[in-house]
Image (cartoon, rainbow, N blue to C red):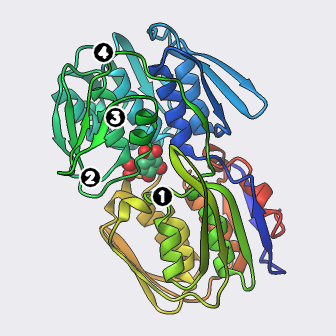
Amino acid sequence: MRNVTISKYKNSFKLECSDIASDKSISHRCAMFSLLSDRPSKIKNFLLGEDTLASLSIAQQLGAKVVKKEGEVEITPPSKLTEPSNILDCGNAGTGMRLYAGLLSGIDGSFILTGDKYLRSRPMSRVTTPLRAIGAKIDGREDGNLAPLAIRGGRLESFRYHSNIDSAQIKSALILAALQADKPSYYREELLSRDHTERMLRGMGAVVEMQEDGWIRVEPLVKPLKPLEITVPADPSSGFFFAVAAAIVPNSTTIIKNITLNPTRIEAYKILEKMGASITYTQKENIYEPIGDIEISYSGKLNAITVENNIAWLIDELPALSIAMAVANGKSIVRNAKELRVKESDRISTVIEALKSCGIETIEYEDGYEIIGGELQKAVVNSYGDHRIAMSFAIAGLLCGMRLEDTECIETSFPNFFDILSQITQLG
Ligand code: S3P
């Protein structure tokens, strides 16, 4: 188990980051969607984290040729996806497992998807149930709810599915299945979850359209898609740790370069702004997604906030936001966020346990928590194998000092996190 000590900050900082980890969601999709073309895809800034490398290695096991050059990954799809001779290991990645489940359900062959002990305890029936309803043959422990998942790919029927969870993973799994179905399919969710799948597939020539009535219509593929030519932007969920750092360390600023400004991904920045941080957004280009820079500056003590809407747009940032809430004036409230319980850890319990060790008063709800702003105290915090818990409490350490246990998980999404953190404080 790797442990790290973070020292309290000594000086304010101005951090200009061109090396925030590349977007994890987009990188997973690059590995998978390139299999839907008949020509090589060229991906610059592919995230070389454990989660997305697992997706890339699965693409290889399915027959793709992967060449990694300086800063670029070239993925040449096979003429027909091959049945792999071994199990497919998604590592820690729910996105990898759920999206591949949708993709492979329609491919001739036998596939076993597995993952680490955390992923093997996360619910999969949210994708296996609707996939089975359209003819997919999937099995797993607890009647298809827990990995390893055994998939016997085959013919899929078109569908009309209204999801009661706003989840890009469910939506994407079903869209990937719909591309292989017999007729057009329709998918609906209450709040539009992150829409990288729709944007990227559309860019590749697939018909994935949002209708006026709120249903997404997906046409089956009649020919291979155009290859991807993409520079993966910085990941707003990774950048957010250093956004919070700037918002809580007096007189500090973080500038995050070339980050996606996709509205479904930057809601947490808007919340931080409402709490009092000063934030500016500068759009520079629009390729599949709006991309630009975000600058975050300290602007005095933050104020408490209630967060109960648009939860799917900030679900990954709530742990880091809890650090801002812990030092804000007053009582912050997070509700309607029970999805937090089925992330890489049960993030309601892990956030609350860690905040309590830092001397912060909290109240736990089934679907969220209350955090009474106070003064963070130095503590020993275990990540429970959850990268976002580890990084959030590393940032908290800037104010109080911190001993972090079990930090290997950071490799899944942000391998150079400590390199950047070491520019603003001392690590041991
Ligand atoms: C992701 C979607 C989100 C997010 C996860 C990545 C994606 O999960 O929490 O880290 O890439 O589609 P849900 O869509 O299941 O909420």
Left or right side of 45 for 79: left
Judging depth in this view, the residue of 312 and 128 nearest the camera is: 312
- Residue drawn at (62%, 55%), measured in percent from left and top? 259
Residue 266 at least partly seen: yes
> How far, Cα to Cα, is label 2 from label 4?
26 Å
Judging depth in this view, the residue of 118 and 61 nearest the camera is: 61
Mark 1 lies on a secondary structure that is loop
Q: Which mark is in front, 2 or 1?
A: 1
Q: Which residue is mark 3?
A: 173
Mark 1 and 3 residues: CB-CB less than 8 Å, in contact? no
N-term mark: 3 or 2: 2
* Image x and y of residue 44, in percent: 67, 35
- Residue drawn at (54%, 87%), measured in percent from left and top? 328
Amino acid type, residue under disc 1 in the picture: Arg
- Residue drawn at (37%, 42%), measured in percent from left and top? 169
When the figure is inspected, residue 310 is found, relative to residue 328, above or below; the finding is: above
* Image x and y of residue 209, in percent: 29, 40
* Image x and y of residue 29, in percent: 49, 35
N-term mark: 1 or 3: 3
Mark 3 and 2 residues: CB-CB less than 8 Å, in contact? no
Is label 2's Cβ within 8 Å of ligand 1?
yes
Q: Which mark is in front, 4 or 1?
A: 1
Q: Which residue is mark 2?
A: 165
